[in-house]
Amino acid sequence: MDPEPQERSYLRGAAGLIAVLAVVVILLLWLPAYRWFLLISTGIGVLVAGTLYLWHHFKPLKEEDIDG
C-alpha cells in the first residue's frame, strides 16, 4: 500500500529558478531601492554562511553528539 514514488522533474526546478532570477532582475532594474536590499541581504547571507562554515570546521560533530 505504499504510494508509488513520483519522479522529480529537473525541468520543473530549472523553470522555477529561471522565473525567480527573472523577477529579481526586473525588480533590480525597475525599483532602485531593491538594489540596496539585495546587496545588504547578500552580504548578511555570505557573513552567516562563512560563520557557520568556520564554526562547523573547528567544532565538528562527534559520534556521541548525534542521537540515534
Image (cartoon, rainbow, N blue to C red):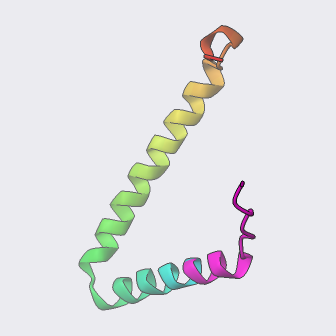
When asked about the image quadrant of residue 10, the answer is: bottom right
Query: Which residue occupies 31% across, 91% down?
Result: 30
Q: Quadrant of the N terminus?
A: bottom right
When asked about the image quadrant of residue 8, the answer is: bottom right
Can you say whether 68 is above or below 38 in the image? above
Query: Which residue occupies 55% across, 26% down?
Result: 55
Front residue of 23/10: it is 10
Q: Is residue 11 magenta?
A: yes
Q: Is residue 37 magenta?
A: no
Q: Position of residue 58 (x, y in %)?
A: 62, 20
Q: Position of residue 63 (x, y in %)?
A: 70, 12
Q: Is residue 24 left or right of residue 14?
A: left
- Give the total number of marks visible in the rendering: 0
Front residue of 59/3: it is 3
Q: Quadrant of the C terminus?
A: top right
Q: Residue furthest front?
A: 1
Q: Position of residue 40 (x, y in %)?
A: 34, 59
Q: Residue furthest top?
A: 64
Q: Give the extent of the magenta segment.
A: 1-16
Query: Which residue occupies 37% across, 67% down?
Result: 38
Q: Position of residue 43 (x, y in %)?
A: 41, 54
Can you say whether 38 is above or below 2 in the image? below
Can you say whether 28 is above or below 4 in the image? below
Query: Which residue occupies 65% across, 20% down?
Result: 60
